Amino acid sequence: MNRSNAPAIKDAVEFDVLLKPYEKFTLDNGIPVYVVKAAEQDTLQLELVFPAGSWHETESLVATATNFLMKNGTAHHSALEINEAIDYYGAYLNRTCAHENATYTLHCLSKHLPALMPTLQAVIQEPSFPEEELAIYKQNMKQRLVVNLQKSEFVANRYIDKYLFGEFHPYGRVSSMEGYDALQTETLKTFYQRHYTYNNCRIFMAGNVPGNAIDLLNERFGKAQWNGNSHIVKPELPIQPAEEKKYRIFNDENGVQGSIRIARPFPNRYHPDFSKMLVLNTIFGGYFGSRLMNNIREEKGYTYGIHSQVHNFRQTSAINITTEAGRDVCEAAIVEIYKEMERLQTELIPEDEISLVRNYMIGAILGDLDGAFHIITRWKNLILNDLDEHYFYNNIRMIKEISVEELQHLAKLYYNPGEFYELVVI
């Protein structure tokens, strides 16, 4: 080997991107378990997913409160005892609640899984929702809301969602003091008993999976029809966007900056334009080298950062441009955003720019597939959205092959300023 000669440079688009397959198991009671094994590190991620997001609640904030408080007391253990049992083994039990689903995720050393399973089982199957824990939760969340409502970026995010989807839709519904005050233990218990059942559970596991992991899961979660059999029918909820398109809200008279949100509805990930729009959005404002960053941050100096993203909600989606800028330059920044939209509509993207973005996007996907935890997350998103590996590989092929003419056509369809909601919170 002649080390004086540098190896050939290989672009990310030249790689064959492969999504490592999962193994699927089924517990005795029918719960599916999806597993991606990797022995590089002696760690494990175990995630239980339920259709228990805000979409399914009939009273505001119930889904999030239920998900949070399941860990704060069980039939036989207090919140302190649960946390000490998890901390003793250096593990972490996280809970999240989104629009459609709610999850509990355990991270631990593989060798400690048997010792942690009884605690995880109790949290999932035997939460008691103590009154004192609910009172603490309500107090903490109301205090947090008071603080956040003083921040222009928090207020802007709340309002733009309401404009896009309607204040009564799960995507546009926001927290309130009245909502927290109305939370009742019996309401949380009812929501829990309906949504956190064995037949609504799906399990995703990744990492250095012990040989007896499926047996352990079967012993704790697969032997009984815990919490009964509940069939969840997702309600059809109409989207009711605001009629006005332009808003200016004064939130803090002493504030030095404003929060800009420019957004429009967009089809969900099942639409043929969704994946293509991810490429155009990256060029426009989806990474640090984007056109919005080059113009509004680097050239004009109006902001430290500006970003555009395509939200991937289940029912519908949205294109959302977000930034914080000085109060005196907010309107000028908006003018530049629309100028960049017009450029994409009238000028073909140069070959060197589209080549850079192709390599960036493929490189980001390669990074997202680095390790079993990332791989199982990719599979989880596909499975929960009723998709398979063909969707993944079609997206890879589209990134590599989409033409600049097609991107210009997309810009003409979806980057028309009159179709965007425009909000500045100062």
Image (cartoon, grey):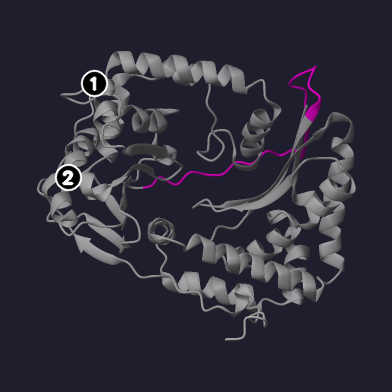
Q: Which amino acid does label 1 sit on?
A: Ser
Task: Tell me: 202 left or right of 170.
Answer: left
Percent coordinates x, y for residue 336 in the rendering: 87, 49
108 is higher (above) or lower (below) than 290? above
CA distance separating discs 2 and 1? 21 Å
Asked if residue 275 can be seen in this view, the reply is no
Mark 1 secondary-structure assignment: loop
Crowding near pointer 2: few (<14 within 10 Å), some, many (20+)? some
Left or right of residue 397: residue 98: left
* 240 to the left or right of 178: right
- Which is more toward the observer, 96 or 287? 287
Position of 108 compared to 154: left or right?
left
- Residue corresponding to mark 2: 114
First in sequence: mark 2 vs mark 1: 1
Give the magenta-colored segment's residue range. Answer: 234-257
- Quick one: 22 or 394, which is closer to the camera? 22
State yes or no: residue 354 in magenta: no
Q: Which residue is drawn at 21% across and 39% down?
A: 116
Which residue corresponds to the image point at 17% horizontal and 40% vertical from the top-left?
Answer: 115
Q: What residue type is labelled 2?
A: Pro
**Dominant secondary structure, magenta:** loop
Residue 383 spot, x, y in % from top left: 38, 60
Residue 397: give its label.
Answer: none
Q: Which residue is drawn at 50% across and 74% down?
A: 17
Please identify the residue farthest to the bottom as the structure is shown.
1
Q: Considering the numbered disc 2 on the image, is that residue within a helix, a strand or a loop?
A: helix
Occupied quadrant, residue 101: top left
Residue 361, position as x, y percentages in the image: 62, 65
Picture quarter containing residue 426?
A: top right
Q: With respect to residue 215, does 389 lie above or below? A: below
> Where in the figure is residue 411, as x and y percent of width and height?
76, 63
Q: Residue 78, labelled with which disc?
A: 1
